[in-house]
Image (cartoon, grey):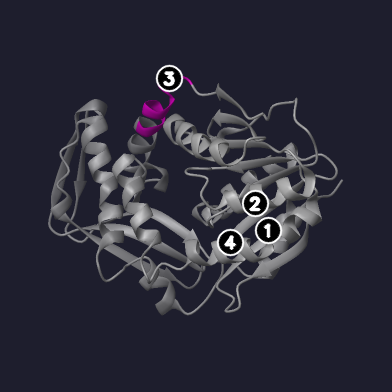
Amino acid sequence: MSTFTLTLTLPADATTAALRADVAHGLTRDPKQLPPKWFYDAHGSELFEEVTRLPEYYPTRVEREILRSRAADIARATGARTLVELGSGSSDKTRLLIAALTERSGPLCYIPVDVSESALKGAAGVLLADHPDLAVHALVADFQAGLALPRERPGPTLVAFLGGTVGNLLPVERARFLSGVRSLLAPGDALLLGTDLVKDPGVLVAAYDDAQGVTAAFNKNVLAVLDRELGADFHLADFDHVARWDAEHEWIEMRLRARTAVTAKIPALDLAVDFAPGEELRTEISAKFREGGVREELAAARMELSHWWTDDDGRFALSLAFPRP
């Protein structure tokens, strides 16, 4: 019989406090920057879903193809009876894993982790309708701030971090994140990691600067979030969307470039932010990876790469890693 449990690990004002801190720090430094998590209010999430359906944006589509062809292999390699998904969102692609793990090992415990309570409840409702024996223990949590998993769960545990989201972290942040994941893993547990791969810069830039302008609207939405949540007076039309390939760091950067001199007031922070004409605000990095680099980063966090699966064109990879002593 299916069960649903929801555990709140964040204070009621945690999201607002984090937004205020990120804006106060990011918009007063040089160069200016904001973390990409602030794209994702309700409208931003809708825009991102639209982005994933664009012909230029391949990662979501390709990762789903790999999962469809390799889910049974992942189930055999791990024998997992608990699946933890970090940044679970709609849990859309995860359904392929849930089906394969359930077929392989029987009733499954699924632990989705997300900062959005509404997203967790919505996804759980769909999953429980499809899987009568599924036990869902949802965690409202920020996995980057440390995470404690429920102790009462069947092993082995598979932790999944999909979508290439690990690429949004700077190298030092990735090292800290992977070490944190390693601390959650017991012998026999595993990490399934989705990574977008280095490829032709033209393909990469197009994926973040589509012809229809959906990604531009998604990028600018962060300003709408600041206007609504902090009483700011940004005008989206004052900024242009910019996507560029940084060959040195092998990552895509998304930025917002001021068309003219702009002064934005943020009353909630008693702050006025000046932009010179052409000045840019970095809103996202999206690192792209090579197999050797992923192997090295996992090894530094005391994990060993066991399986490496890509699509036929080598655009995206799923890697499976197990903890080392």
Label 4 element class: strand
Q: CA distance from mark 4 to mark 1?
A: 16 Å
- Of marks 1 and 3, which one's residue comes earlier in the chain? 3
Q: Amino acid at mark 1?
A: Ala
Which residue carries the number 4 mark? Answer: 195
Q: Are marks 2 and 4 in contact (CB under 8 Å)?
A: no
Residue under label 3, please give it. Answer: 12
Disc nearest the viewer among 3 and 2:
2
Q: Nearer the viewer, residue 44 or 170?
A: 44
User: Which label belongs to residue 97?
Assistant: 2
| Labelled pair 2, 1 in contact (Cβ < 8 Å) | yes
Quarter of the image with the N terminus is: top right
Q: Position of residue 240 (x, y in %)?
A: 21, 60
Q: Nearer the viewer, mark 1 or mark 3?
A: 1
Residue 255, x across and y down, in percent: 32, 58
Toward which corner of the image does residue 194 lie, by quadrant?
Answer: bottom right
Residue range in magenta is 11-19
Can residue 10 be seen here? Answer: yes
Distance in Å between CA atoms under marks 2 and 4 = 17 Å
- N-terminal-most mark, 2 or 4: 2
Q: Main secondary structure of the magenta part?
A: helix
Q: Determine the CA span between mark 3 and mark 4.
A: 32 Å
Q: Amino acid at mark 3?
A: Ala
Amino acid type at image mark 4: Thr
Question: Which numbered dot is residue 71?
Answer: 1
